[in-house]
C-alpha cells in the first residue's frame, strides 16, 4: 500500500507545484512579458531579414482565359 | 469585557473589506484597472483579481484551457504532425508568428473587468474564433506548397476573398474545403496584434501606390507584395470586397496569384430585382467554374444540409438579439458579440459555431431565468454603427469599465439578418444571392442611403440612447454620408460620438486618441464622472 501511495503523492506534489507555477505565470503576466520582450523581437528580426521573392518581377498577363458560362 | 475601541472597529472593518475584496473582487468603482498596466506596452503588472471564483475561472477555464486547446486544435485539425506543421508556418509567415503567440492578451483586453456569466459567455465566443482560426490556418499550411504541404490537399482547397461567403462552397464541403485568403493573414491579425498589418500597408505604399485609399485594401495587397500568402489553392473566387480600393487590390492579387480566377462582385443596387437575378446567375456560373476546374460535381444534398445547419445558427442569433434588445440579462459583451457574429456569419456553417452556441444558450437561459443583470453599471445603451477600428475592437470593454457605456449591438452583427429557404432550388438560389450581396461593408456602409439609415430602426429596437458612430477616415463611401448623419443626429436629438479611425492602421488615430474623444464627449456634453478614473488616460501605444 505504501509503495503505491508514495509515487502517487510524488505525482500529486509535482502537479500541484506545476499548477502553482502556472498560476504565478498567469497572474504576473509572465507569458505576455516573455512574448513581448523575447519571442516577438526575435521573430520580427527573422521576418525582417527573410529573403522574399519580388512578385513584381512576374509578367502581368492580360491574355488569360475568360471564364464565361 | 471591555468594549472594542474605535481603532479595533476600524481594523475589523478594514479586515472585512479586504476579505470581501479578495473573495468577491472589488466593486466596479474601486477596481482601478488602469493601475494594472505597464506603461506603453499594455502588458499587466499583474492580471486583474476578479474575486476567487472568477479569477480561478479565468485561470483554469480561459487561460489554461485555451493555451492547451491552441495546441490540441493543431492536432485535431491536422493530426499528430500538426505542431511541426505549425512551427514551419510560424517560421515562414509573419502574420502567423506575430499574431498567434499573443492571443491570450487578446482575450485579456476584450474581457477586462468582466465577471460571472458575462465573462463566461464572452470567453466562449473568443474560444470559438481561436479554434476556427486554427482550423483555417492549419488547412492553409497542410496544403501549402511553399512549406512542403500535401499536393493532394492543395488540389482540394479553394481560396476566396474574405467577403465571399463560405456558403457558396457548401456543395463541395464533403470532398473539398474552402479557406478565405485574408481572414487570418489580415483581419484576425489586426485584432490580436495590431503591429503586424503595418508591414503590409507599408509594402503597398513602397511600390508607389497611393496611401489614401482604404488601408484594408493596401494591407491585403501588401501581403501578396511581401510574398506572405501560403500557396494552398489551385483556383480562387474573388469579389469586389464592396469598394473601389479593393477592386484595385484584386488587380494586383490576380497578377500575383496567376491562376484560374472567378470574380463575383457584390453589386451596389442590391434591392433591384434585376440585380438579384444577375447575382443568382453569377453564383451558378461560379459553381460551374468550380466543377470545371476541379472535376468535382455540385451536390444539392450537401448544399441543403449545410444551409439548414446555418439557419440554426441564425435562429439562435435572433434569440440572442431578442434578449439583448429587451432585457438587461444579455451576457455577451460588445466586442465578443461583434467579432463572433461577423466571423461566423461570413465563414458559414462550421461545427465550432454550433458547439459554442449550445454552451452560450445555456448561459443565456440561466441569465434570463435568474434575471441576472449582466452589465449592472450601464448608464447608456449604445449601438455602434459603420465599420469599427480593427486595432481597437475592444474599445467597448474599456468604455463600459470607464464610463458605463454598454455597447449592446453593432452594425456588422445585423448584416445577415436572414435564413435561407431550402424548399426548392430556385428559392435557395434567390436567397443565397441576397446573402452574398449583403456582404460586410456592402450591406449597410456602402449599400445606399436607405440601408445605412437603418440605424434609426435598430436604435429603437434595441432600446439604445446613444450611438458610437465609426468614422473610417479613408472610406470614401462613408465619408460621403458624414454630413447627412450629422444633420440627422441633430434633427433627432441623438447623442452620437464620432470615432475617427483608419480601420487597421493605428498610426492615423491611436487608441489613446479614441479614448480621449470619448472622454471629452462624456465630460463636456454628458457632464458625467468616470466610473474608473484610472482608465481615462494611459499610454498603450506599443501594445498588441
Image (cartoon, coloured by chain):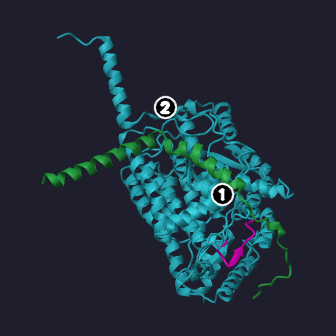
Q: Is residue B230 above or below residue B525?
A: below
Residue at the (60%, 70%) spot, across then down: B140
Q: Quadrant of residue B303?
A: bottom right
Task: Give SS at disc 2.
Answer: helix
Single out the residue that lies furthest toward the left. A1
Image quarter of the N terminus of chain B: top left
Single out the residue that lies furthest toward the front. A3
Q: Which chain is cyan?
A: B
Earlier along the polypeptide chain: callout 2 or callout 1? 2
The chain to which mark 1 is attached is: B
Look at the image and tell me whether residue B503 can be seen: no
Query: Around disc 2, counting alpha carbons within 10 Å, would you say few (fewer than 14), some (14 to 19), or many (20 or more)?
Result: some
Q: Position of residue A3 (x, y in %)?
A: 16, 53
In space, the residues marked 2 and 1 are separated at their CA atoms by 40 Å
In this view, the mark in front (2 or 1) = 1
Task: Give SS at disc 1.
Answer: helix
Residue at the (85%, 56%) spot, across then down: B210
Mark linked to residue B29: 2
Q: Is residue B41 above or below residue B488?
A: above
- Nearer-the-camera pick, B53 or B4: B53
Q: Which chain is green?
A: A
Q: Position of residue B71 (x, y in %)?
A: 47, 60
Q: Determine the main secondary structure of the stretch shown in magenta.
A: loop
The chain to which mark 2 is attached is: B
Query: Around disc 1, counting alpha carbons within 10 Å, would you say few (fewer than 14), some (14 to 19), or many (20 or more)?
Result: many
Mark linked to residue B94: 1
Q: Position of residue B343 (x, y in %)?
A: 58, 62
Does residue A7 appear to the left or right of B154 in the view shown? left
Q: Is residue B241 magenta?
A: yes
Q: Which residues are magenta?
A: B231-242
Q: Position of residue B52 (x, y in %)?
A: 36, 40
Residue at the (81%, 64%) spot, across then down: B244
Amino acid at each position: 500500500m505504501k509503495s503505491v501511495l508514495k509515487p502517487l503523492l510524488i505525482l500529486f506534489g509535482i502537479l500541484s507545484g506545476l499548477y502553482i507555477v502556472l498560476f504565478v505565470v498567469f497572474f504576473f503576466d509572465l507569458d505576455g512579458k516573455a512574448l513581448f520582450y523575447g519571442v516577438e523581437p526575435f521573430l520580427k528580426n527573422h521576418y525582417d531579414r527573410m529573403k522574399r521573392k519580388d512578385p513584381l518581377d512576374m509578367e502581368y498577363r492580360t491574355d488569360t482565359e475568360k471564364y464565361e458560362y | 469585557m471591555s468594549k472594542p475601541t474605535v481603532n479595533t472597529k476600524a481594523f475589523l472593518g478594514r479586515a472585512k473589506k479586504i476579505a470581501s475584496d479578495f473573495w468577491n473582487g472589488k466593486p466596479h468603482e474601486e477596481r482601478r484597472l488602469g493601475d494594472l498596466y505597464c506603461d506603453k506596452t499594455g502588458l499587466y503588472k499583474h492580471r486583474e483579481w476578479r474575486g476567487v471564483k472568477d479569477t480561478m475561472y479565468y485561470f483554469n477555464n480561459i487561460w489554461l484551457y485555451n493555451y492547451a486547446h491552441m495546441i490540441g486544435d493543431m492536432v485535431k485539425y491536422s493530426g499528430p504532425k500538426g505542431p511541426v506543421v505549425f512551427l514551419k508556418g510560424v517560421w515562414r509567415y509573419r502574420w502567423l508568428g506575430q499574431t498567434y503567440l499573443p492571443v491570450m492578451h487578446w482575450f485579456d483586453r476584450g474581457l477586462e473587468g468582466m465577471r460571472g456569466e458575462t465573462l463566461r459567455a464572452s470567453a466562449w465566443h473568443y474560444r470559438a474564433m481561436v479554434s476556427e482560426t486554427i482550423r483555417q490556418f492549419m488547412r492553409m499550411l497542410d496544403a501549402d506548397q511553399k512549406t512542403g504541404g500535401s499536393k493532394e490537399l492543395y488540389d482540394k482547397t479553394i481560396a476566396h476573398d474574405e467577403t465571399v461567403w463560405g456558403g457558396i462552397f457548401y456543395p463541395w464541403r464533403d470532398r473539398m474545403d474552402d479557406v478565405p485568403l485574408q481572414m487570418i493573414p489580415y483581419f484576425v491579425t489586426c485584432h490580436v496584434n495590431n503591429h503586424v498589418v503595418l508591414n503590409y500597408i507599408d509594402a503597398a505604399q513602397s511600390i508607389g501606390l497611393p496611401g489614401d485609399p482604404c488601408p484594408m485594401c493596401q494591407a491585403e495587397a501588401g501581403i501578396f507584395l511581401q510574398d506572405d500568402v501560403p500557396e494552398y489553392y489551385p483556383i480562387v473566387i474573388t469579389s469586389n470586397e464592396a469598394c473601389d480600393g479593393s477592386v484595385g487590390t484584386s488587380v494586383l492579387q490576380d497578377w500575383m496569384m496567376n491562376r484560374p480566377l472567378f470574380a463575383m462582385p457584390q453589386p451596389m443596387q442590391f434591392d433591384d430585382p434585376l440585380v438579384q437575378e444577375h447575382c443568382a446567375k453569377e453564383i451558378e456560373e461560379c459553381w460551374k467554374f468550380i466543377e470545371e476546374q476541379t472535376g468535382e460535381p455540385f451536390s444539392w444534398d450537401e448544399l441543403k444540409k449545410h444551409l439548414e445547419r446555418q439557419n440554426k445558427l441564425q435562429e439562435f442569433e435572433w434569440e440572442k438579439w431578442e434578449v439583448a434588445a429587451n432585457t438587461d440579462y444579455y451576457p455577451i459583451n460588445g466586442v465578443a458579440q461583434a467579432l463572433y457574429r461577423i466571423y461566423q456569419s461570413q465563414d458559414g456553417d462550421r461545427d465550432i459555431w454550433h458547439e459554442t452556441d449550445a454552451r452560450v444558450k445555456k448561459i443565456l437561459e440561466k441569465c434570463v431565468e435568474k434575471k441576472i443583470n449582466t452589465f449592472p453599471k450601464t448608464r447608456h445603451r449604445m449601438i455602434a454603427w459603420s465599420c469599427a477600428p480593427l486595432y481597437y475592437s475592444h474599445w467597448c470593454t474599456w468604455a463600459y469599465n470607464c464610463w458605463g457605456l454598454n455597447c449592446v449591438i453593432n452594425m456588422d452583427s445585423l448584416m445577415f439578418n436572414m435564413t435561407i429557404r431550402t424548399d426548392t432550388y430556385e428559392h435557395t438560389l434567390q436567397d443565397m444571392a441576397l446573402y452574398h450581396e449583403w456582404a460586410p461593408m456592402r450591406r449597410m456602409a456602402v449599400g445606399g442611403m436607405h440601408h445605412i439609415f437603418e440605424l434609426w430602426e435598430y436604435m429603437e429596437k434595441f432600446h439604445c440612447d446613444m450611438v458610437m458612430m465609426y468614422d473610417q477616415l479613408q472610406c470614401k463611401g462613408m465619408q460621403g454620408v458624414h454630413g447627412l448623419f450629422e444633420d440627422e443626429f441633430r434633427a433627432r436629438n441623438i447623442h452620437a460620438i464620432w470615432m475617427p479611425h483608419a480601420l487597421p492602421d493605428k498610426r492615423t488615430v491611436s487608441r489613446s486618441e479614441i479614448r480621449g474623444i470619448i472622454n471629452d464627449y462624456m465630460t463636456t456634453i454628458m457632464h458625467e464622472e468616470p466610473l474608473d478614473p484610472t482608465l481615462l488616460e494611459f499610454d498603450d501605444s506599443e501594445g498588441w
